[in-house]
Image (cartoon, grey):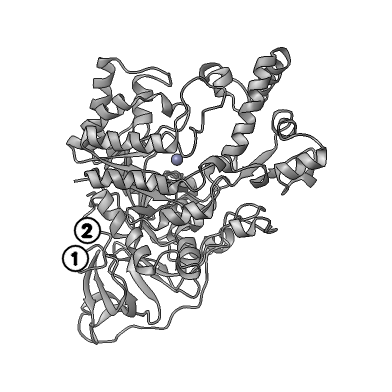
Amino acid sequence: MYRKRTTRTVLAVFFLGASLPGVIFSAPQEETTLQTSEEPSYDIVLRGGRVFDGSGNPWVYADVAIKGNDIVGVGDLGDASAERVIDVNGKFVMPGIIDLHSHANSGFDMDDSDEREASDLARATVNNLTQGITTVLFGEGGSIWGEDSSIQDKAEEWSRNGIGTNAAMLAGIGSIRNKVLGAVDASPTPDQLEEMKALVGKAMEGGAFGISNALDYWNGHFATTEEIIALAQEAAAYGGMYVSHIRSEGTRSIWWVASDSSPRVTHLDAIQEIIDIGREAGIRVHILHIKSTGIPFWGRSRDATALIEKGRAEGIDITADQYPYTSSGPDRNTQLFKWEPYLGEAVGRELEVAERKALIRQRMEGDEVFATQLEKDVMHEILARGGADRMFVRAFEPDSSYVGRTLEEIAELREENLFETGRYLQLDNDAQIQSYSMIEDDLHHYMTRDYIAPATDGGAAGPRAHPRSYGTFPRMLRKYVLDEGVITLPFFVRKVTSLPASILGIKDRGYLKEGYKADILVFDAETIQDRATFDRLPDLTDAKLSEFIADGDPHQNSEGIEYLLINGALVIDGGEFTGELAGEVILRR
Ligand SMILES: [Zn+2]
């Protein structure tokens, strides 16, 4: 582990009031500072809460004592003295949340010394703290330290500047491939493969927890199973894991179009591939944001988990994570007309969006076969995105009356078929469309599995952030645990604490027990709530298809986290961010 403790206090409260309206300013909790002539025994005591240990057991009444970075006592601590005694009677106390899929590194990377306070605040990732997150894992295809730097450099940079939560990192096969091969549809030569393996080894020696890739995307899909197995064997030799945005999450890969001659990969094929990688490379494998997307795949979550459970029965250590939303990242920016399969990566990448569209329009006019294929591809895309009645226009300059309407409604208004309307909206114009490609039933099913951990797949706060960046864990608690009872509270606590710690192989976090790091979350079951919604769009559930949230705002921090401790430091105190940057870089030992 990277031991250097960096704690910096920022002028946070002032800034939060100005720029982060979602942060809660609740009244300070009642508390006592015990006045004794002797040195207090502890730094902090959380008194009288309902305490979860993280194992899946129900809560018990207990006090929790913290000294330095560590939890030093759990139980009835009587009148034990402390620098700070916090009465948490009526509140729930649990280990801090470990988020296995984060993109908040862009916040940590802020280091503009002219704007010290703003960059300190960005590095705090308050949108994560207000969800109760204390540790994040970075990596989905790319190495977040870049192609020309090292994990050690990134660890040193963050430790020097200070970061809001603890952070662990994966090496990205995407970055390694790009460095050695470039963004090409080719397999490495034996020499190139050795070079790639050496880069995996270097990252693992530097403290990476494993390797990752994103096979569902255009560049990612060039990697073959054999190539991945070779790299995974290298990571496994260091005790690392293999983490993947697998090749497909429905009936096809995101990049694939119906007219493409290459075989269509389904979610089940993709799960089978990662199980095979686990077996062949002798490595722990983990599926990022497991989901069942597209109308033809709704309800297939049961087939997916059956396959995973068969793999587990065979002895493959396979796990997954999920986010609790029915609209994905690509759904938020639905592209009915792709360009990669038609123009090719090398040509298309060099062009402006308008030029790409012009080329596709041109070809449509001169080539009837292509025009027919394109129509088929667009109709396939509509199905894969959840159907024309779940695709909403979020922005459309030529006619603002289309905003908030579905593709289906607009086609009716225009008396056109879906393809013609899609063409008008996105090929002739630049409509932004958001889809809801998943359904609640599949979300629920995945939640009930004991090897699937909730995770954000969220980033730092910012204009392009998905609501999951602000709301994932409080949403799980409010909606799926407390209101709908899809899973129980102790099961939820286990799934966000000891489960991800065990998946990562972290031995001193994930439980609320004596000797563990003092990463602790205190929440109020009355008030815990996510506030981030999709931007002026329906926050769809299947029962409420037409609900329209007129003042929707994805940039709202969650409410209800009363206290948050990271490495023994209070980072949220009485619902307010304290300004403390208490996170540590965690390197694999
Ligand atoms: Zn992904």
Q: In this view, does 541 lie above or below 344?
A: below
Which residue type carries mark 1? Gly
- Give the left or right position of residue 334, taking residue 5 as reference: right
Which residue type carries mark 2? Asp
**Location of residue 238 (image quadrant):** top left
Q: Are marks 2 and 1 in contact (CB under 8 Å)?
A: yes
Q: Give percent across and percent down for residue 37.
A: 22, 86
Q: Give percent across and percent down for residue 256.
A: 52, 28
Q: Mark 1 points at which residue?
A: 515
Kindly tell me whether mark 2's CB lies below 8 Å from ligand 1. no
Kindly tell me whether mark 1's CB lies below 8 Å from ligand 1. no
Q: Give percent across and percent down for residue 503.
A: 27, 50
Q: Mark 2 points at which residue?
A: 508
* Residue extending farthest top: 366
- Give the left or right position of residue 338, taking residue 56 as reference: right
Question: From mark 2 to mark 1, how far is it between C-alphas?
Answer: 8 Å
**Location of residue 509 (image quadrant):** bottom left
Q: Residue at x 47, y 63 (%)?
A: 480
**Location of residue 565 (image quadrant):** bottom left
Q: Is mark 2 on a helix, strand or loop?
A: loop
